[in-house]
Image (tube, rainbow, N blue to C red):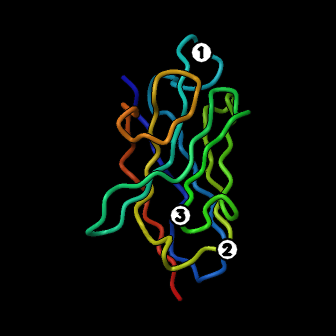
């Protein structure tokens, strides 16, 4: 019953910024509801495994970021439970950031980096960064 939709991807130049958004489709999966989920962002490039980028807790007060590619220094994850959205602000984009970006939900409030704990996935949005 949980459906997630990503948006905001596109083609940009190195050093530019993008803001990705993840929204629930159908039932409410985050926000002021009985059911509570942590939301994560993952990305996948051709020939590579899907990798963790960032995650945020139910209340938006706790977050986790990947160590690779200076993600913590350049990206910010946030959520607005009133609007049922989770955003990923990406600054200082590099060609290495080129990938399909997915949002995912896991039961419980605490964000984790383990992809195996995420049960519901969106279809992804393409981010391409040219040099």
Q: Earlier in the sequence, mark 3 or mark 1?
A: 1
Question: What's the distance in space between the residues labelled 2 and 1, CA to CA?
Answer: 35 Å
- Determine whether, in the image, residue 100 is placed left or right of residue 97: left
Q: Nearer the viewer, mark 3 or mark 1?
A: 3
Residue 51 in picture, x, y percent from top left: 41, 55
Residue drawn at (51%, 69%) of the image? 10
In the displayed structure, would residue 44 be above or below residue 30?
A: below
Q: Which residue corresponds to mark 1?
A: 33
Q: Mark 2 vs mark 1: which is more N-terminal?
A: 1
Seen as rendered, the residue at the extreme right is 61
Q: Which residue is mark 2?
A: 92
Q: Nearer the viewer, mark 3 or mark 2?
A: 3
Compared with 1, 122 (above or below) is: below
The tag earlier along the polypeptide, 3 or 2, is 3
Quadrant placement of the N terminus: top left
Q: Nearer the viewer, mark 2 or mark 1?
A: 2
| SS at badge 2 | loop
Residue 73 in percent (x, y) is at 70, 63
Q: Residue at x 64, y 63 (%)?
A: 90
Up the image or down, 10 lies above or below 106; here it is below
Mark 2 crowd level (few <14, some 14–19, many ≥20, 10 Å Cα): some
In what element is the residue under mark 3?
helix
Residue at which label 3 appears:
68
Taking depth in this image into account, of 35 and 26 the one nearest to the observer is 35
Q: Residue furthest front?
A: 67
């Amino acid at each position: 019953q949980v459906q997630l939709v990503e948006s905001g991807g596109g083609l940009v130049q190195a050093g530019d910024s993008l803001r990705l958004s993840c929204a629930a489709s159908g039932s409410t999966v985050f926000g002021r509801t009985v059911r509570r989920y942590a939301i994560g962002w993952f990305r996948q490039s051709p020939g590579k495994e899907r990798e963790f980028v960032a995650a945020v807790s139910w209340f938006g007060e706790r977050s986790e970021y990947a160590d690779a590619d200076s993600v913590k220094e350049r990206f910010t994850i946030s959520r607005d439970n009133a609007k049922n959205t989770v955003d990923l602000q990406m600054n200082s984009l590099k060609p290495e950031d080129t990938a399909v970006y997915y949002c995912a939900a896991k039961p419980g409030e605490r964000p984790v980096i383990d992809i195996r704990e995420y049960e519901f996935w969106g279809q992804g949005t393409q981010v391409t960064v040219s040099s």
